[in-house]
């Protein structure tokens, strides 16, 4: 019985064991499969996190580079500011910082080339770099503000100085006017004129020319003209003892244009200018006179000499347009400081010419050729006489005049 039962169970046990083993194998396979999937997901997760971290490290590195560059810029600005006015301590401090920051840039470059961009906390590094960059930017703004304040103070000082010079010039002009009018005959009639009257009027004309030349050179400097080249084009091959003496070349050019044809009668001129015409122009500003008498000989003279003196290319270079020239061509008076200064020169030259024509015989104009030997009888030097025994004339700045038997010296530049 027992043997029959055992023989019956044996096949069943074997079958059950096989079935159980199959189930275990399936379960083991499933567990292995699930574990494989989990390992892949974890690898992917860590790879993604590693990429993000590396990008953050690179961002932090770039932030440090830009922060260092901004520090170099701020330090350079500080170095420039310390040079004017000269600050030895400030220059030394800025120089040390500049060297240090350039060294930091070199180290960052080496780190990049060697791929040593380790950073445990890139987010913190980025924030610190941004703060540093903002501080450097603020420092540059502060330096710019200081420079503007300094320039403003300098301009204020220049304004005060120029006001004093203007007041001095006005006082001297009034004194000359009083002396000119106190002679009596000039204000009433031209028949009793003296060479002294002419000489005083010439001094006023010369001052007006020089004031206009200073304004013109100032405009040229603002427009980035090469002043040396411009002076050389007017008076070539001249060696100036001082750089500021180049202004005399421009004065000679203005005088050459404005005094051209000084002794020639213009078509429409009256035989002798009346005292009323003379005094009316003398007492009015050029704009007022031209507005009253737009067809007068002086108006034509003013318009024509401006168009000859100021070339279109020059006007466009100085002002960026041809507005003044177009207004003059249309018979209108430009409302600019530049033209107002020019018109005063035209007025002074025209008054001087009226005086010259009123003398009997008429006052004549002369100038000295380049290379002429200097003589005090006919010439007056605008610069110090050279050491050599026989100084020569480089060019005539302001022409001279012969009024009867009196010689009014021309002004020359000696070399």
Image: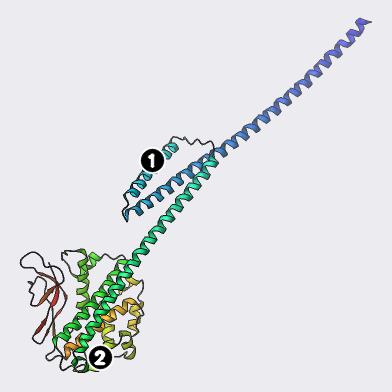
Residue 263, visible in the rendered structure:
no
Query: Disc 2 on helix, strand or loop?
Result: helix
Residue drawn at (16%, 71%) of the image: 382
Q: Write down the quadrant of residue 81 in the picture.
A: bottom left
Looking at the rendering, in which quadrant would you find the N terminus? top right
Query: Disc 1 on helix, strand or loop?
Result: helix
Residue drawn at (63%, 35%) of the image: 45
> Farthest left residue?
389
Residue drawn at (67%, 28%) of the image: 36
Compare residues 311 and 278 and report the one nearer the observer: 278
Residue drawn at (36%, 73%) of the image: 321
Q: Nearer the viewer, mark 2 or mark 1?
A: 2
Compare residues 1 and 259 and report the one nearer the observer: 259
Relative vertical location of residue 221 with respect to residue 139 in this rendering, above or below: below
Q: Residue 414 in the image: x percent, y percent?
A: 12, 69
Q: Residue 205 in the image: x percent, y percent?
A: 22, 80
Say the numbered circle drawn on residue 103: 1
Relative vertical location of residue 8 with respect to residue 352 in this rendering, above or below: above
Asked if the residue at tag 1 contacts the one at tag 2, i.e. Cβ–Cβ closer than 8 Å, the answer is no
Residue 187, visible in the rendered structure:
yes
Q: Which residue is mark 2?
A: 279
Q: Residue 201 in the image: x percent, y percent?
A: 20, 83
Looking at the rendering, in which quadrant would you find the C terminus? bottom left
């Amino acid at each position: 019985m027992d043997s029959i039962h055992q023989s019956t169970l044996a096949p069943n046990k074997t079958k059950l064991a096989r079935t159980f083993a199959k189930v275990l194998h399936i379960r083991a396979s499933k567990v292995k499969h699930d574990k494989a999937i989990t390992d892949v997901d974890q690898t992917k997760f860590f790879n993604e996190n590693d990429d993000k971290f590396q990008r953050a490290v690179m961002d932090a590195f770039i932030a440090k580079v830009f922060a260092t560059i901004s520090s170099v810029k701020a330090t350079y600005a500080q170095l420039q500011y310390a040079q004017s006015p000269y600050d030895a301590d400030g220059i030394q401090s800025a120089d040390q910082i500049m060297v240090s920051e350039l060294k930091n840039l070199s180290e960052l470059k080496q780190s990049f080339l060697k791929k040593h961009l380790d950073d445990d906390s890139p987010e913190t590094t980025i924030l610190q770099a941004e703060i540093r960059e903002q501080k450097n930017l603020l420092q540059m703004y502060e330096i710019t503000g200081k420079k503007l304040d300094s320039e403003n103070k300098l301009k204020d000082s220049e304004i005060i100085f120029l006001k004093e010079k203007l007041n001095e010039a006005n006082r001297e002009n009034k004194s000359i006017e009083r002396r000119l009018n106190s002679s009596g005959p000039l204000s009433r009639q031209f028949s009793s004129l003296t060479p002294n009257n002419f000489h005083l009027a010439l001094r006023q004309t010369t001052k007006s020319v020089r004031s206009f030349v200073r304004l013109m050179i100032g405009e040229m400097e603002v427009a980035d003209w090469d002043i040396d080249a411009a002076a050389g084009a007017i008076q070539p091959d001249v060696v100036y003892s001082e750089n500021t003496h180049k202004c005399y070349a421009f004065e000679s050019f203005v005088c050459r244009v404005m005094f051209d044809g000084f002794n020639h009668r213009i078509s429409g001129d009256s035989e002798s200018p009346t005292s009323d015409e003379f005094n009316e122009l003398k007492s009015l500003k050029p704009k007022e006179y031209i507005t009253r008498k737009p067809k007068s000989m002086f108006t034509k003279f003013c318009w024509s000499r401006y168009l000859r003196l100021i070339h279109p290319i020059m006007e466009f270079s100085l002002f960026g347009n041809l507005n003044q020239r177009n207004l003059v061509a249309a018979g209108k008076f430009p409302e600019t400081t530049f033209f107002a200064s020019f018109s005063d020169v035209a007025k002074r030259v025209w008054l001087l010419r009226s005086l010259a024509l009123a003398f009997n015989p008429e006052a004549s104009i002369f100038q000295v050729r380049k290379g002429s030997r200097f003589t005090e009888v006919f010439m007056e030097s605008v610069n110090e006489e050279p050491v050599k025994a026989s100084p020569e004339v480089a060019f005539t700045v302001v022409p001279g005049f012969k009024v009867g038997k009196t010689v009014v010296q021309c002004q020359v530049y000696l070399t």
